[in-house]
Image (cartoon, rainbow, N blue to C red):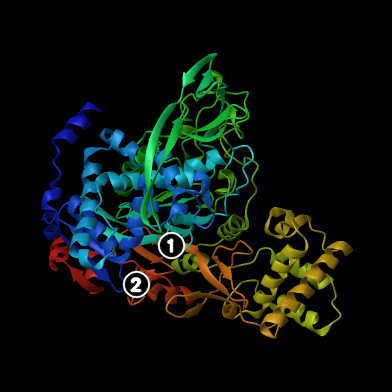
Amino acid sequence: MITAIIALLLYVSPRAAADSLAGQVTIYRDTYGVPHIAGETEEATFFGYGYAQAQDHLERMMVQYLDAQGRRAEVQDFQALGDGYLHFIRYEYRWDGDYLQRLLRTKSGVAGNRDQIPPGVYRILDAFARGVNFYIRENRTSIPAWIEEITAEDVEALERSQYFRFYSIHDALSKLPGSTYSFPHLGSNQWAVSRGKSANGRVMHAEHTHMPWANRFQNYEAHLMTPGKLNAGGISWFGSPFFLDGFNDRITWSATYNNPNIADVYEEKLKPDDPAKYEYDGRWRAMRVEEETFRIRGPKGLETVTLPLYYTHHGPVVKMDRTRHRAWSVKLPNFENTTYSAALYGLMKASNLAEFKAMVARQWMPRWNLLYSDAKSIYWVHNGTVPLRPAGFDWSKPVPGWTSATEWKGYVPFEQYPQVLDPPSGFLQNCNNPPWFVTPHSELKSPAPYYLHSPGAALNTRGERLLNVLSENRKFSIADMIDLAFDTYIVAADIFIPLLERTNPRDEQARRAVALLKEWNRRSSADSTAYTIAYYFGKAYQDLFAGQFSRFNSPERTKIDIGSAEEQKMAAEALREALNRLEKRFQSIEVPWGRITITRRGGDFPMDGTGLYGVLHPDTGIEQEDGRILCNDGWGHVMVAVEGDPKEIWTLLPYGQSENPSSPHYNDQTILHSRRQLKRFWFTPSEILDNTKSVWGKRGRLSSIREQ
């Protein structure tokens, strides 16, 4: 710690000469606008990355930074402060508001604990910020006046904000008494096959992130190169310098959302005549009370409001009931840490399994299923930062805060986390399922009763599909991996088609619908009329029989008695309603799915995925009055990587690299998505130079790297 402090004191930021790194980096844009950034030093490379992100997404980045600082209301309105100060935005998967950001100390916590940031990581954060600032200064007259330059601390604050609100705070606030919010369905897929399961004898690794296409978790793809130091590609969230999913020249890694029980709520007893004090082990303690002044954009300009922030020794107070003399505070893992950037940077730098595991074992990342591969091995860990909790309490609810008997006793050691290396099955997979489904006969169990939020969770349809396909007695080619990435097999159809056949419909329209379903390949596709019927059947069934449709998308489907007259009656009624809706909206029951589900991005493009039946390839969105579905959710990114020399990678961003409608990279990947195609991610200097369309900086820099 002392060494780090001294190093930071000796480090003088060259911000005053912010141009210095610009001459040490080159940004090569390929045919899809992906920046391949080559720098003489890592600082120069990350400077280039900040500049490249700003070129494509400056305003969205800057809103993110203001958000992390608790200042978004300055450029938006009072709602950005927080509706009731704790406001959940379902589409963005997060609790929202400037008040919550200040309460969580996302920016002030960085300033107060800056010495925790390793000096090398701080220099990278600073360099990234300088790259953003360099772009801002170059374009000052053409960008909004509210955009300000940023600091290294702002970048780390954004990383803290992402972790707190996407991970920790959700776990805690879901335990509040009277909580009415439900976390939206999250999906991501990852799988890898070993050399013995691969047709070419090489390890292969695939991932999908499933994220909305226009929120804070939109992805940005890039490639960072520093000779002898770094050669990594992957995806970042806007404003982040680091890859959550990615690869370097030695390894590949991916993340899916998991559900370890990592945060808690403590119910506090307040002193009746002095509610700023709370009971603890028979004595009264004073809460820490801070005041924050917020500036809010209003009709008359900026207005100010000053609000109190309350803390017990457990953590921030998120709810207070003075009538009942109660308060509720949240305890979050790593609340005072500023090591989130260091964790992601460590994954990017790892060159082998030992280094990868050593970084994860530091427990700086509160959650994520992490899948790893290299040229020889595949490995998976159900990562988390799970507290060691005393027995005798229900940790799914608020626990007594007035006794030391409920204090955490550290964290579950990394060695006890569910993990698998090179299984006999030859494959690993996770689709947000509990750890014991990662591979057949894994024999994994939860290390403690409170480890998972939902210890009895069942296998979902995506995990079921992957387990079935990867368990087949065959070896997989690259084409097979890409096909599986686009897979839309409807597992539920294995039950509802035989059920509908048993209904023996009498009217011609229903008989035609059942005939189409019998001939159908049980996949959603843009040209499929049968899937459109299946989709409308599922929606009608949901509407008519609340709570019953979910059986088709769970292992419970095998318990549906297709010979039951009652089951047949419900299915027939849902089919009739589905056909009526189709006829009313489209004047036909035979409507191609691609006419209904589209992506609108510089044109209308038919999509073939679906969110209704939990397929591997989801395309979801908002249904319009005319019946069409405008996709704005589903894949956030796709990657298929083949390990070895040379490493080969295929990727896709479903919306493209740029948010500028006039850019050719606004919808070029949307077109690929509509055609069920991935693009090559160019990785070697020769590949990059052969596919470069534009250059910022010294053009010959990559040639010199190639010669090295």
Q: Amino acid at mark 2?
A: Asn
Mark 1 or mark 2: which comes first in sequence?
1
Q: Which sits in the foreground, 613 or 10?
A: 10
The Cα atoms of the two marked residues, 1 and 2, are separated by 19 Å
Relative to the observer, which residue lies in front, 160 or 656? 160
Q: Is residue 428 above or below residue 388?
A: below
Question: Height in image: 605 above or below 253?
Answer: below
Q: Quadrant of residue 266?
A: top right
Q: Which residue is mark 1?
A: 637
Q: Between residues 87 and 707, which one lies in front from this camera angle? A: 87
Residue 666 vs residue 471: left or right?
left
Amino acid beneath label 1: His
Q: Residue at x 72, y 82 (%)?
A: 583
Secondary structure type for disc 2: loop
Quadrant location, the C terminus: bottom left
Decide if residue 347 is in sight here: yes
In the shown orientation, is residue 689 left or right of residue 655?
left
Which residue position is annotated with label 2? Answer: 660
Residue nearer the viewer, 227 or 449: 449
